[in-house]
Image (tube, grey):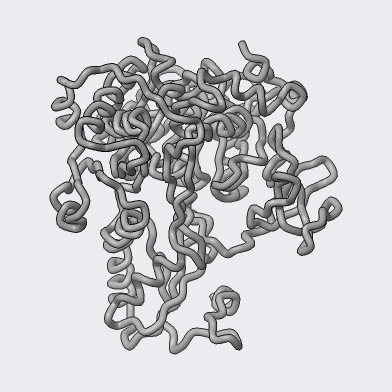
Amino acid sequence: MHAILAARRYPDARERFRWDALWDLFDGDRERLNLAHECVDRHAGDATALRIALADGRRAEHTFRELTEWSSRVARFLERHGIGRGDRVGLMLEPSLPLYAALFGTLKRGAVAVPLFTLFGPEGLALRVNDCRPRLLLVDRDAERWQREFPALRVLAFDEAALATLSTERSDYAPSTAADDVAVLQYTSGTTRGLPAAIRHTHRSVVTLMVAALYGVGLERGDRYFCPSSPAWGHGLWHGTIAPLALGIAAGSYAGRFDARRLLEALHAFEVTNVAAAPTVFRLVRRSGLVRNHGGPRNGPPNPPTLAHAPGDPGRGSTIGRVHGPPLRLRKLSFTGEPMDSGTWDFIEHDLRVTPCGMYGSTEVGVIIANYPGFEGYEVRRGALGTAAPGWEVGVVDERGQPVPPRVMGEIAVRRKGAWFLVKDRGFVDEDGYFHHGGRSDDVIISAGWTMSAVEIEDVLMAHPDVREAAVVGVADALRGQVAKAFVVAGRRGDAFEHELQDWVRMRLSLHEYPRRIEVVDGLPKTPAGKIDRKALRELD
């Protein structure tokens, strides 16, 4: 086993880490490398590659051999239909064999995969489509509707039936891409003052990703891993899908609307030992009341959590409440995207009997602070982001870019090319090298792990005929961490109007990206320069 993979003690992990050594984990090199080959083809065999909790309640498993063959058929299909190297292919698909076949088939072909959230409305999708100009959009439903919305774009329904039509395609394909070729356009949701941005990920991005995989998620051979985050977003795609597959570990995913019972049933059925999710997922599991720990200290004799019935639920048709033996086998649990509240932390430690491990970074640089899940000799400190990940020099700097002493608040930054790169969060570092979060620097709205753009929401609100002005800020919420709140200047008021505005945004932008709170006001506070004073709005809230 490679020395980096064998190091499972915290001191050894830091001592043995070398950036150059990460390349030894892959078949490719700095000149030629293909993500699909590294994640799929080189592991081809009967080992499980995918464990999926499907939207209809069923569960499915697929081998590396299946994924290799179906992704090769997709690559040949794309080639036959004129999709060339560098062409964009939009993937608006729920986790399923068709999604992963399309994703890795696109990468094999040398085209660029553009993951898109299945809950986008026409305006939310149009922002991305008009920016990246894909040659093809694959959807799992409503193909005719989307074709009408985008007549210049070729839209194809891509589901199990579509895969069946590809069965005549050859099941082998030899990918050939440069390591620096663009592989994925990953859209962020923008900041409060910016529209969604497409981050360009090359095939070699998988090398840097190993820092997050090994030290943020704690992936190792033998893990039964699950990540319910949507592959349309960074966490679900990179940490949830590409990271485990690149290491030959099966990826576990969740399709459809979130339901705590269905997630817990999947964790039990798939015998999951390592789970990664946004804190909101664990909050919702906590509130479901479905998990019980019947006593015993955190590090005492085995007394695993059991899965209880919801109030009034006899458990018919469910594995929960009538399983035999330990139903949950979690050994590692990681989260990212937002801080974790103390109540959920207590629930995870007491009821799930595992220590939550956060990780921290940015889309541009990846994970730079980690809590080393599963590593011996590392102390996870409650409330801290963690310590610097191997290979990174992380610090806290002042407004002049100079490092500040321990316990002094400043901007969290990482050293890149001889200079400090700000990651747009405030915080401090303690005497032992643990970093602590102090709030966002750019007022981005992070709700339930989703990063949302106030500009997008404001633009759609302003399109409503009764809205004269609108401003959106993030406000605290006990369940989601933050939610978007809209202050609206309009000639109408009342609950019915506020619900109308929420539906207006939800149907045009996305089912998750809308103002959960709305306040109709007479006017918006302005700065001397005439800009909306968002600080004043947050204080007003």
Residue drawn at (29%, 77%), measured in percent from left and top? 464
Name the residue: 73% across, 21% down: 16
**Image location (x, y in percent) of residue 445:** 51, 61
State whether residue 235 is above or below residue 512.
above
Residue 434 falls in image quadrant: top right
Q: Is residue 320 visible?
A: no
User: Can you say whether 144 is above or below 103 in the image?
Assistant: below
User: Relative to 368, is 251 on the left or the right?
Assistant: left
Q: Quadrant of the N terminus?
A: top right
For the residue pair 223 and 36, the one nearer the viewer reads as 36
Residue 39 visible in the snapshot: yes
User: In the image shown, does 111 or 300 lie closer to the viewer?
Assistant: 111
Which residue appears at 37% of the width and 24% of the height? 175
Q: Position of residue 302 (x, y in %)?
A: 59, 19
40 horizontally vs 368: left or right: left
**Count of numbered labels shown in the rendering:** 0
Q: Nearer the viewer, residue 516 or 468?
A: 468
Q: Position of residue 92 (x, y in %)?
A: 29, 44
Residue at (31%, 44%) from the top-left corner? 90
Which percent across, then down, holds residue 371? 66, 35
The residue nearer to you, when weighing 375 against 403, is: 403
Determine which quarter of the picture holds residue 404.
bottom right
Residue 138 to residue 514: above or below: above
Quarter of the image containing the C terminus?
Answer: bottom right
